[in-house]
Amino acid sequence: MLRSHTCGELRMEHVNQPVSLCGWVQTKRDKGGMVWIDLRDRYGVTQLIFEEGKTDPQLLEKIRSLGREFVVKAEGKVVERVAKNDKIPTGNIEVRVENLDILNPAKLPPFLIEDETDGGDDLRMKYRYLDLRRNAVRKNLELRHQMMRQTRTYMDSKNFIEVETPVLIKSTPEGARDFVVPSRMNPGEFYALPQSPQTFKQLLMVSGFDRYYQIVKCFRDEDLRADRQPEFTQIDCEMSFITQEDILNTFEGLVKHLFKQVKGIELTNLARMSYADAMKYYGNDKPDTRFEMRFTELNEVAKGKDFSVFNDAELIVGICAKGCAEYTRKQLDELTEFVKRPQIGAKGLVYVRYNADGSIKSSIDKFYSEADLKVWAEKMQAAPGDLLLIISGEATKARKALSELRLEMGERLSLRDKSTYSCLWVLDFPLLEWGEEEQRWFAMHHPFTSPKPEDIHLLESDPGKVRANAYDMVINGVEVGGGSIRIHNRELQAKMFSHLGFTDEEARRQFGFLMEAFEYGAPPHGGIAFGFDRLCSLFGGADSIRDFIAFPKNNSGRDVMIDTPSTISNAQLEELSIRVSMSGKK
């Protein structure tokens, strides 16, 4: 080894020891008679000292030629620092250098390799290999490593076997677009990159591998946002001979294990909530339960006056913002404009101030008396000093808009603390959802999800009321995992495909291999997949998953560092039997 120690491990017990360090020049401070260099590697920073009269003059001359990010090897003796630095673990010592080799010079980086860098997102993504030298990004990847290691430790302890499934598979409809790969040896035919290993893990259950997991790359060609990338990582799991309760207990255990081992947090048992209650009280199926502010429906007490907006509404629903009665007109106008944004879609916002003196004033006083408004306040469990915020309209749209407003109020009131974690299971999702544009049913999760046994009879008469044997894990308003008990019976699976609009021929072509496997003794089975990148970002207290991925894509799905996606040569296209016309159109 070129080095005897790393730049993060030297302490007072190493004083007077000869050492050899390798790393990158973080900073250089030249005070004339003395020069200090902060040498950095993955493990930390050690200060090097050079002093006129004690350091060879030729070495001092070499030192003064060093620039930022030069790669060097320094040999010398550990000494106690006079001016100690309690902000770094090596702050009590420094190395008095006797010899220094420049292993590689470096150009001046395009941005500071510091925690507080001057590089914007685009620049740092272009030079990601430099960005990865920064402590903040390195710590994110170290967290990811710990999460991966502890996941394997837990799964191994529960007798799961890790099995790798294929990356080149058959294109199947799973809700998002596939990335496809042309086959040179089979002209005109294509592989797809997996959106998940779903069918393969079910086949492993048929094979008798009753406990499978895999930390696996998946691919979806969909529009990007902070918590999405075209390629992402899942903790993918499946179990045989189990009930839903077994799945919930096993993977609640995984999450508790990760919190304890990685964050030092002891979680209590996770709360459970039905999909129906999540929608009724929070307006979405992944509620942030770090704070209350639950919905209250007001149809019974708000209709029947001369206010046509409420009388004509399918739903009148509100939230109580504790301690916000003193909001100014400007603040209330901001909230009104917030809910009227096109992506939220409310037509307006009604507010009721329950003042500290017990009086009540609203934005619709001419339609409702103070006695009317006090009935609302009682129904919403409001107290003097609270602010009631109410939205009306078509039920689904009103709940969606109020959900966004609730989250906005949570932000404004600092109720969404990233160091606080609230985890729950959301259960009993609808099996199917109706697509108005396509005029047909779609699987809310995927076509292999089993209906609740007691609801199977409704598949023919009332498909929209069939509940799925499905479950999502939600942490702080983020869906981090989802799964279901699977269909393991050929007849029921065929019926499910039929309800989803597949002809018998289409079902055979897409999933004939799975249907046939069910005829050879498929056990009852179910599973779950966790979004590993999302879990890492939650544990790291970040909104975006990008800084927890070594080489992520940008919001346009591009890797600006290696400049991809990119064109390929006509010769490659011809070899893949992809014809190119004279106009360049394929």
Image (cartoon, rainbow, N blue to C red):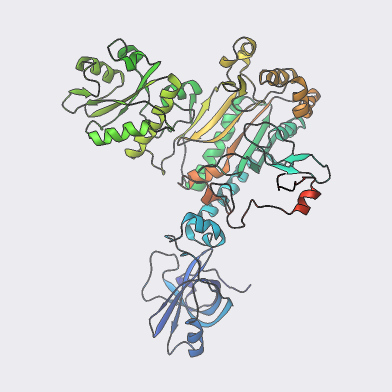
Question: 373 or 184: which is nearer to us?
Answer: 184
Looking at the picture, how far across and down is residue 307, in whole percent?
Answer: 29, 15
Instruction: Give the x, y percent position of residue 183.
Output: 79, 44
Which residue is outermost to the right? 185
> Is residue 69 at all visible to an observer of this figure?
yes
Any part of residue 269 in sight: no
The quadrant where residue 341 appears = top left
Q: From the viewer's perspective, is 66 left or right of 530?
A: left
Q: Residue lying at the far left in this picture: please name it.
A: 357
Camera-side residue: 287 or 423? 287
Outermost front residue: 582
**Residue 499 point in image, percent of width and height:** 66, 18
Quarter that holds the N terminus: bottom right
Q: Residue at x 51, y 77 (%)?
A: 17
Quadrant in which residue 228 is drawn: top right
Q: Residue at x 31, y 21 (%)?
A: 380
Quadrant for the C terminus, please.
top right
Q: Is residue 358 left or right of residue 169?
A: left
Image coordinates of residue 123 in percent, x first then y, are: 50, 58
In the depicted structure, whether residue 17 falls above or below residue 364: below
Q: Nearer the viewer, residue 283 or 243?
A: 283
Tell how many labels.
Answer: 0
Q: Is residue 3 above or below residue 449?
A: below
